[in-house]
């Protein structure tokens, strides 16, 4: 196949940040995707409907003219989340979901939930309203090996929560293990999972390829090859429980290339093309539209766009870096390398 036409895809897990970085990264996502689920881990986090509304306005101000793009906002859950504000924000069309960051799991998560029972009231209200819970599924106890954090979270937190709230709808964000792929299909259609391009393309060796590779460092961390293979089988399976969410997570170069570098892979400039490499290698391009454009829309309950886009098998060189004014630069996934697919313009 040398060209692929699909309904315009949606990226159901992005970090846009704020300020200068936001202005420079939003156009990449808005060009390639009809919609995005926007993560709320700003500093301070987006914890109220009023904050989300203001943030949505700042995002829309960064969308290039004549680009059709809809950001879908999320609420950052804390031990003190006000369920009535959350549900009012949902009824008003501001909140599409709420995000659980276990405290200290990842970037800007110090305000996260310290123990799941602290938010049982909120989860009960979300279950009644049909508002999806998005989870960063990692245990954060320091005694847990970093490569076992996802499995531990599924066993200790996720499964008991799904049993306690039998109608709660959950997206397991950025699954990285075979255990995650299995859990995403074990609860019928009320549980789903996003999968990033880097977890489909790389295993943990990529972190140490010829030396330490800060731009491959994200959380949850890259895993063993057997997990990568399980994620690839899941993504191309055509099952409605799996959909596209890049977890594009820009951090300025000097904050990644540092003695305590930030976690996050900036994939927005090359996201669809990176997934296409996976689906082509798996001989599953006919199932790409389901993963990229349809499954997530069905889960979140929006109509997939009527508009289509065409990707052609024409190589392009990915930008070596993306300048962010005086602040510095971002290094994208596949920086300076050739990628086989391109968006057909016009
Ligand atoms: C994300 C970030 O930088 O906000 N980082 C990452 O490595 N994925 C946070 C997250 O999604 O864990
Ligand atoms: Zn993320």
Image (spheres, grey):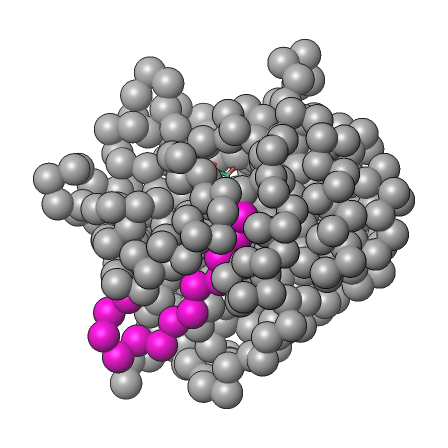
Q: Nearer the viewer, residue 94 or 154?
A: 94
Does residue 223 lie above or below 193 as drawn?
above
Q: Is residue 272 left or right of residue 278?
A: left
Which segment did they paint magenta? 63-75
Looking at the image, which residue is at 45% across and 44% down? 46
Residue 195 position within the rendered picture, expressed as x and y whole percent measured from the top left: 59, 52
Q: Nearer the viewer, residue 140 or 258?
A: 140
Looking at the image, which residue is at 35% across and 45% down? 17
For residue 155, say whether it is visible. yes
Looking at the image, which residue is at 54% across and 42% down? 76
Residue 314 position within the rendered picture, expressed as x and y whole percent measured from the top left: 34, 72
Residue 295 position within the rendered picture, expressed as x and y whole percent measured from the top left: 65, 69
Looking at the image, which residue is at 85% across and 37% down? 160
* Residue furthest to the top: 143
Tell me, yes or no, whether the highlighted magenta stretch contains residue 71.
yes
Does residue 301 lie above or below 234 as drawn?
below
Residue 119 position within the rendered picture, expressed as x and y whole percent measured from the top left: 71, 36
């Amino acid at each position: 196949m040398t060209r692929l036409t699909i309904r315009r895809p949606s990226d159901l897990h992005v970090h846009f940040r704020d300020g200068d970085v936001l202005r420079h990264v939003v156009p990449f996502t808005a060009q390639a995707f009809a919609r995005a689920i926007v993560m709320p881990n700003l500093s301070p986090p987006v914890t109220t409907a009023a904050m989300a509304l203001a943030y949505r306005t700042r995002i829309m101000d960064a969308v290039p003219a004549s680009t059709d793009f809809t950001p879908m906002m999320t609420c950052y859950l804390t031990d003190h989340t006000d369920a009535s504000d959350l549900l009012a924000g949902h009824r008003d069309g501001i909140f599409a979901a709420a995000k659980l960051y276990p405290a200290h799991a990842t970037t800007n998560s110090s305000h996260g939930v310290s123990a799941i029972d602290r938010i049982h009231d909120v989860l009960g209200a979300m279950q009644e309203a049909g508002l999806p819970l998005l989870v960063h599924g990692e245990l954060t106890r320091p005694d847990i090996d970093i490569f076992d954090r996802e499995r531990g979270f599924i066993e200790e937190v996720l499964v008991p929560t799904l049993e306690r709230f039998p109608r709660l709808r959950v997206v397991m964000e950025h699954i990285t293990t075979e255990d995650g792929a299995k859990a995403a299909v074990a609860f019928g259609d009320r549980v789903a999972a996003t999968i990033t391009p880097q977890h489909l393309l790389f295993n943990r060796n990529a972190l140490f390829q010829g030396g330490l590779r800060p731009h491959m460092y994200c959380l949850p961390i890259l895993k063993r090859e057997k997990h990568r293979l399980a994620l690839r089988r899941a993504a191309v399976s055509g099952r409605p429980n799996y959909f596209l969410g890049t977890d594009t997570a820009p951090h300025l170069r000097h904050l990644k290339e540092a003695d305590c570098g930030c976690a996050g892979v900036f994939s927005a400039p090359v996201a669809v093309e990176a997934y296409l490499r996976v689906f082509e290698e798996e001989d599953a391009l006919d199932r790409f539209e389901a993963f990229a454009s349809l499954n997530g829309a069905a889960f979140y309950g929006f109509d997939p766009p009527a508009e289509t886009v065409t990707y052609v098998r024409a190589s392009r060189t990915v930008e070596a870096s993306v300048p962010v004014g005086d602040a510095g630069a971002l290094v994208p996934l596949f920086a300076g390398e050739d990628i086989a697919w391109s968006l057909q313009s016009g």
